[in-house]
Image (spheres, coloured by chain):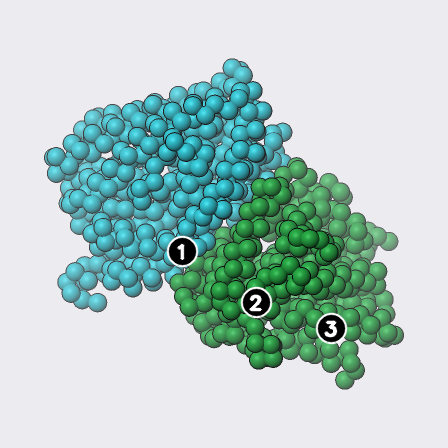
Amino acid sequence: MSEKVNPGAAATAALKDQSQERQKAMIAEHFRKLAEAPERGEKCVYTFVPGNLTELIDSFGLLPVLPEINALQSGMRGKSRDYIALAEKLGHSEDVCTYVKCDIGMLKSGNVGPTGERLPNPDLLLLSYTGCFTFLKWFELLGQEYDAPVTMLHVPYQGDGVVTDSMRTYVVDQLKKKIIPALERISGRAYDEEALKERLERSAQAEEDLVWVLESAKRRPSPIDAYFGGVYYIGPIFTAFRGTQDAVLYYRELRAEVEERIALGKGPVTPDGEIANERYRLVVEGPPNWTSFRKFWQMFAEEGAVVVASTYTKVGGVYDNGFRHDPDRPLETLADYCMGCYTNLNLPTRVQMLERYVREYSADGFLINSVKSCNSFSAGQLMILREVERRTARPGGFIESDLVDPRYFSASNIKNRLESYFQMIEQKRAGGV
Amino acid sequence: MTELEQLLARAEELYRDLRFQAVTDWKARHGGLAIGFMPVYVPRELLHAMGVLPVGVMGAGDDLEIIRGDAYYQSYICHLPRSTIELGLNGALDSLDGMLFPATCDVIRNLSGMWKLQFPEKYAHYLDVPQDFDALVGGQFYRRELEEIADELHRRGARKLEPAALRRSIEAYNENRSLVEALYTLRIDEPWRVPTHELYLLLRAGNVLSVEEHTAMLREYREAVLADADRRSMDQARVLLAGSFCEQPPLGLLRTLERAGCYIVDDDFVQVHRWITGDVRANGADPLGDLVLAYLEQGIASPIRYIDDQAKGQALVERVERSGAEGVIFCAPSFCDPALLDQPMAVAAIERAGIPWTSFKYAENTGQFQVIREQAGTFADSIKLWSE
Ligand code: SF4
Ligand code: SF4
């Protein structure tokens, strides 16, 4: 353990972090509800994180299940290796997204969720297809496994870097003609726009606080880590809780905790303690690795490297560009939300966003974690690297791993690359290269 | 050289010409715009009606040394985009006034943005074909999308899109498609008359020639092979090749499969020619609407198209039956998400129907075919054994 990390402070912080306790309780409660759903006659909707319609689903009293979250949890709990191996044995290619294989392997192994309880079968596969074509194949695959209807929401891509009226109309038309009728059929309830609006109102409140928390990293030292820590902060809003009162409270508490850290001049908390000496401020592009998440984080923390902004924390919604769910335009706002998720932005927009982060967060450099699984993120990242480097004149770094396939996480390799990268930043500071 | 040999030599020359001279020549003759498009499907009729030459860009096969393209892509991404970038960087695509990137997969999608960054002076547009097939929902969206493209091309110098011209273009492509289909049918009936490596070169010629020239070429080829008494039946296994709808296998691989004892009686190559089944209505009052409807209702069941009726793979089984194939070879590019994610579902359907299958992967620049040759040979032998 490096002296830059202070374990004692972590213990105190962990004790104090009410928001974390609340998040844990929310998740436990959600999985309990899911486990009991079949008995209680409650219906479940499988759906995805980017472009999720959580407020709408909740307004029908339906429970969402998010396969990517199950996959990443399986990765963190050391189960993904076996699940992926099983899926590959069943004929799934070694070349494709490991989230899909992890999910299929989990399903074939009894569909036991992250809390150890069995997940219910879907009553509806709600394919909201934002920013990635693999989602489409994923639910075609699940469609073969379950006796549940699939309803698709095709979300157009921001190919030209803008959302046009035509795109918005297309999504709203699908919501009206396809999605809402499907939710009505499954739930046996009529669409209740007032109920949706209430939820959207609460979403906007939580989003406001989330953005405040993420932007707190503009300070020196940053009170948060916006990548490793960030994945915890986005948890509730990206998953089953956007639009709930729990989420509003969670983000209010989180904000208060961060305010306190700022007042005390503290750096981010890591699993091994607080980063007391912020040496490098980084912007990170790409998802993290989940199988060695803690080890990965340690490699940064030990060097005093703090991630001040990341794109991964925008896959389930980009809020720091001003977007908030708007209860006055309930379906249009859902459409705008879906189309605005990070991987639905074209490459030039992604480059601009990274460039902005590097400048606004006073980063020393930016780093890409390129994951083998995900063409949606990865195809084009080498060009992004060059472009951002050219525009910001800050050093860019590139490492490769995977989301949940431990075969593609080489700790020594990544550590070496990170060390050379930090050296590069030092040289740059010293007026070298 | 016989006329047939000359025609095939011309087709192979077009296929190997990575400077796209045919496009430059066409522009010199006609003075219109040339717009490239990536796999799989774009409505070429629309471009044609505006006096624009649609040019299919399908990577660079095994003929191009990749010098800069590899610096744009990680090792775990398919080969097609890196050779396409290479072509862009080395000036081979300079004759193109723009590129369309249809919604095929995330790699092509992201390539559209890379193109915008790399070639800011050129038109680069992501063609977001709908996955909702309701005429009043996805259809309306698609129509607006096509209108936007037409407006933009007009701004850049193309003729205005007029219904009468579009009707004529639809007719021209209907004729072209029916000739392609006729060759596929002839290959089913008499595969020795239409070897796949020849048919493939003809399909590729259609990527760079005007539809009129290509139609003439198809017709000439058909007449020539029907008259060629030297083409005789051999004892080969009939196979359907599935999965090669985007990055294309090298020509050598097709020849290898044929030499290994396979008659390929159906395939997914250069699918733009076969995406729409049957004719697009050509005499309606609203030809753009007819083009949209054809996309929605006459499109093939490709892995890049959403299938929601729980009958995944059924279309493949039907193709096997229609073509009289005795087995399926899944032949997909390495790291090709749509093909490889689809494969387990297709395999399940094929197995349910009791059809033998095998699979391998390739890259467009694969140079060694020994393993594939052995695998295909064994597969062909086993099929023949079973059918005896
Ligand atoms: S390819 Fe990427 S975005 Fe798509 S499902 Fe996999 S990890 Fe998610
Ligand atoms: S080969 Fe497959 S993954 Fe590659 S660009 Fe084509 S469809 Fe996409």
Secondary structure found at label 2: loop
Which mark identifies residue B58? none
Mark 2 or mark 3: name the one nearer the start of the chain: 2
| Residue at image location 69% in from the left, 49% down from the top | B298
Q: Around disc 2, counting alpha carbons within 10 Å, would you say few (fewer than 14), some (14 to 19), or many (20 or more)?
A: many
Ligand 2 near label 3 (Cβ, under 8 Å)? no
Query: Could you tell me which chain the residue with mark 2 belongs to?
Result: B
Please say if B90 is above or below B345. below
Left or right: residue A24 compared with residue A104:
left
Residues at marks 3 and 1, CA–CA distance in whole angstroms: 40 Å
Q: Where does the image place residue B249, in percent across and percent down from the top left?
A: 62, 64
Residue position for label 3: B217
The residue indicated by pointer 1 is A347
- In the rendered structure, the colour chosen for chain A is cyan
Secondary structure under the numbered disc 1 in the rendered image: helix
Colour of chain B in the image: green
Q: Amino acid at mark 3?
A: Met
